[in-house]
């Protein structure tokens, strides 16, 4: 009975499982497939023969002659098309005077066997025709019948030839390793910043005071507001010429000139006799990331804090523990599990983040991450294969991180 019930349960869940599997795995497998092929945007469609039919001359009376012209063009500059055949139906009463050697006429059916055509093929096929009285009476236009073209063309997207050329070019690119470092820098510090701000906000609102509900709602604003709205607001506030922050800093005498927060790659700083380049634009983008996504951490951490028994805090207070000691020895051990889960989620989401950086800097000034590189390769450079290869690298990095994280991540204390 138990086995039959288990089989019945599996059969009932099978449609849902297949749907989820198709939604999740199909795009992933397609991405792996494209990454192993030199696919350009122009390769999304196979090469086809484009035909434009024209009638050159006026056929207004019986006996008038004209030229029926077919302009033929291979849509691809590189890929050939094999065994090309064009068929067209001629109007009644339109007699052919001169017929191309590659064409035959059966009734009113015109068939032209063009054979194999190379990439970039262009040709004009001309057929001399004469109008009869029947054609003048019907006044039928030869272009009313669309030419039909058949042929075989290999599509690089669907053939079974694979290579690692895209990955080789990606890894040999001098920009790739810099982009990878920027991605980790942005992800790690953006994730830690969001967790620290969320922890601070949760600790602040874990006590009862007037207006706490309103403040909680305000804390959620960065997360629920449309990203394009908050990104535009930050760009306006930090504008080097008319931005509010630059104006305040200059009036206070903190800086002598405006700072291009989203356009300045780095600035040289001196600290205890050491000089280093401070990444201005990248740090600003990280600050935006931490500010925008700390409410998610804030909600989870606050919910976990409120589930901790108050008896432990009362006992610690009786024993003379300071608020900092209570947080370090009571609250933090209880929050380790939720912090670990939040770090995993925020790391994955931040590493995959595209819209924030693209809206703020467009990937310029040293803020180009792997996800922005996917867009640049696939659409700016029209190299879908290279873009898919970078996306595969993103997947592999996150997979390795997830495995290591689940292996060594801390758990909640009982």
Image (spheres, helix red, strand yellow):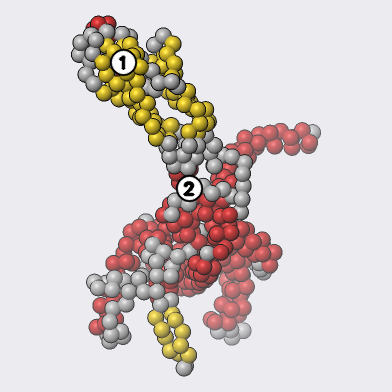
Residue 120: x %, y % from top left = 43, 39
Secondary structure of the residue carrying tag 2 is: loop
Q: Quadrant of residue 410?
A: bottom right
> Which image quadrant: the C terminus?
bottom right
Within 10 Å of disc 1 (Cα), the crowding (few <14, some 14-19, many 20+) is many
Residue 134: x %, y % from top left = 27, 6
Task: Give the label on residue 42, or none.
Answer: none
Q: Quadrant of residue 412?
A: bottom right
Specify whether 272 is left or right of 8: left
Nearer the observer, 296 or 329: 296
Please tell me whether residue 275 is drawn above or below residue 192 in the rendered image. Answer: below
Q: Earlier in the sequence, mark 2 or mark 1?
A: 2
Residue designated by label 2: 40
Residue designated by label 1: 129
Residue 211: x %, y % from top left = 37, 68
Secondary structure of the residue carrying tag 1 is: strand
**How many numbered discs?**
2
> Which image quadrant: the N terminus?
top right
Nearer the observer, 208 or 2: 2
Specify whether 357 is left or right of 191: left
User: What is the residue that sits farthest to the left in this orientation?
Assistant: 60
Query: Taking the image as drawn, is residue 314 in sight?
Result: no
Residue 295: x %, y % from top left = 45, 64
Please tell me whether residue 193 is drawn above or below residue 272 in the rendered image. Answer: above
The residue depicted at 53 percent of the width and 81 percent of the height is 323
The residue depicted at 46 percent of the width and 39 percent of the height is 119
The residue depicted at 44 percent of the width and 51 percent of the height is 382
Marks 2/1: CA distance? Answer: 42 Å
The residue depicted at 46 percent of the width and 88 percent of the height is 275
User: What is the residue that sits farthest to the bottom in this orientation?
Assistant: 273
Please tell me whether residue 323 is drawn above or below residue 372 in the rendered image. Answer: below
Query: Taking the image as drawn, is residue 169 in sight?
Result: yes
């Amino acid at each position: 009975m138990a086995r039959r019930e288990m089989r019945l349960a599996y059969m009932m869940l099978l449609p849902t499982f297949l749907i989820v599997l198709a939604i999740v795995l199909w795009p992933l497998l397609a991405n792996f497939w494209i990454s192993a092929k030199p696919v350009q945007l122009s390769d999304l469609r196979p090469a086809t023969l484009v035909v434009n039919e024209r009638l050159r001359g006026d056929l207004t009376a019986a006996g008038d002659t004209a030229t029926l012209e077919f302009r033929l063009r291979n849509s691809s500059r590189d890929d050939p098309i094999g065994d090309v055949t064009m068929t067209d139906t001629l109007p009644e009463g339109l007699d052919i005077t001169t017929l191309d050697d590659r064409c035959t006429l059966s009734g009113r059916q015109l068939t032209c066997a063009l054979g194999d055509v190379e990439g970039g093929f262009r040709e004009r096929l001309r057929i001399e025709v004469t109008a009869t009285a029947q054609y003048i009476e019907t006044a039928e236009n030869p272009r009313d019948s669309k030419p039909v073209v058949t042929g075989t063309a290999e599509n690089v997207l669907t053939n079974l030839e694979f290579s690692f050329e895209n990955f080789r070019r990606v890894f040999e690119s001098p920009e790739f390793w810099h982009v990878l470092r920027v991605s980790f820098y942005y992800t790690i510090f953006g994730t830690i910043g969001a967790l620290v701000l969320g922890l601070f906000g949760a600790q602040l609102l874990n006590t009862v005071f007037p207006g706490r509900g309103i403040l909680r709602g305000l804390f959620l604003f960065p997360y629920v507001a449309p990203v394009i709205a908050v990104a535009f607001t930050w760009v306006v506030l930090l504008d080097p010429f008319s931005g509010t922050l630059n104006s305040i800093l200059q009036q206070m005498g903190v800086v002598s000139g405006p700072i291009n927060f989203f356009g300045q790659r780095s600035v040289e700083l001196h600290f205890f006799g050491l000089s280093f380049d401070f990444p201005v634009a990248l740090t600003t983008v990280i600050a935006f990331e931490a500010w925008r996504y700390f409410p998610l951490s804030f909600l989870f951490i606050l919910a976990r804090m409120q589930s901790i028994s108050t008896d432990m805090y009362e006992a610690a207070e009786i024993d003379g523990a300071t608020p900092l000691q209570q947080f370090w020895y009571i609250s933090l051990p209880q929050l380790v599990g939720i912090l670990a889960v939040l770090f995993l989620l925020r790391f994955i989401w931040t590493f995959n983040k595209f819209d924030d950086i693209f809206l703020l800097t467009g990937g310029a000034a040293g803020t180009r991450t792997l996800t922005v590189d996917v867009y640049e390769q696939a659409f700016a450079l029209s190299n879908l294969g290279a873009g898919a290869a970078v996306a595969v690298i993103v997947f592999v990095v996150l997979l390795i991180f997830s495995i290591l994280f689940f292996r060594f991540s801390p758990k909640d204390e009982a």
